[in-house]
Image: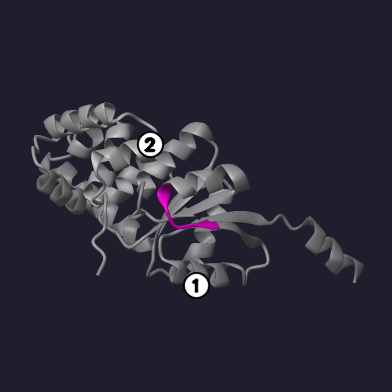
Amino acid sequence: MHIFLSRVLIMELIRVLLIDDHELVRSGIKALLEKSEDIRVVGEAGEGHEALRCIKETNPDVVLLDISLPGLNGLEVAAKARKDSPRLRIVFLSMHSNEEYVLQALKIGASGYVLKQSSTRELELAVRSAKKGETFLSPAISNTVVSDYMARLKGGNVRKPGVNPYEVLTSRQREILQLIAEGFSSKEIAQKLGLSINTIEVHRANLMDRLNIHDIAGLVRYAIQTGIIEVKG
């Protein structure tokens, strides 16, 4: 009895913050994770800016983060959170398996990238690996990324840094682009971000120039194509 109690007392719980804009998804993942003795969900969020607040309030060991979030997408949340806390462990839990998302996540410093269709075992491994400072990728992602990279290498078509138009935007411009694509007016965006309308208009003009897109409809299409926002079915 004494040995069992000692084992329980010294077990280090992994404190997880769960961020996804679908409440049912969060509930399901939480129920699965908390079947493990060493994992506890300490908070939840369903929107980007809310996620940043929850990270500061709960100080989790690992953040499980979806890419497609309203307000501020997961990649932006991760970049901002890791700027404030470089040692923060982030595991992306996403439906997107294409190379571009994975490479952007790893560039930000993610500790893992798991597909939503993965097994519970994979998710647990990703959380535990992140806690230990290791990197975990779903096997399906690993195979895809390596294969694509090797094909580009052989064909002499490896992407050069900075070629992706999304990467030439500043963090603030990406944030404003997402809000524009979600249908908010300049006045509403100014209120949300605590900036003047003139400042928002300047940012909008600059991001249009950088992307060479000069109408709102074009910005919306671009945001959808690059996964900055997700079209809900």
Query: Which quadrant would the C terminus be assigned to in this image?
Result: bottom left
Mark 2: which amino acid? Answer: Leu
Query: Which quadrant would the N terminus be assigned to in this image?
Result: bottom right
Which residue was labeled with disc 1?
Answer: 28
- Count the numbered circles shown: 2
| Observer-nearest of 5 and 217 | 217
- Earlier in the chain: of badge 2 and badge 1, it is 1
Q: Residue 141 appears at what percent x and percent y?
A: 33, 58
Residue at 38 percent across and 36 percent down: it is 193
Q: Residue 145 appears at what percent x and percent y?
A: 28, 52
Mark 1: which amino acid? Answer: Gly
User: From the viewer's perspective, is residue 133 above or below residue 46?
Assistant: above
Mark 2 residue element: helix
Which residue was labeled with disc 2?
Answer: 193
Which of label 2 and label 1 is nearer to you?
Answer: 2
In magenta segment, residue 47: yes
Q: Is residue 146 visible?
A: no
Which quadrant of the structure image shows residue 46? bottom left
Residue segment shown in magenta: 44-48
Q: Residue 161 appears at what percent x and percent y?
A: 23, 32
Colouring scheme, one of rainbow, by chain, secondary structure, one colour: one colour
Counting other residues with Cα less than 10 Å from the Cα at mark 2, is it few (<14), some (14-19), or many (20 or more)? few
Using the numbered discs, state the Cα–Cα distance from disc 2 to disc 1 in whole angstroms.
32 Å
User: From the viewer's perspective, is residue 89 above or below residue 87?
Assistant: below
Q: Is residue 221 visible?
A: yes
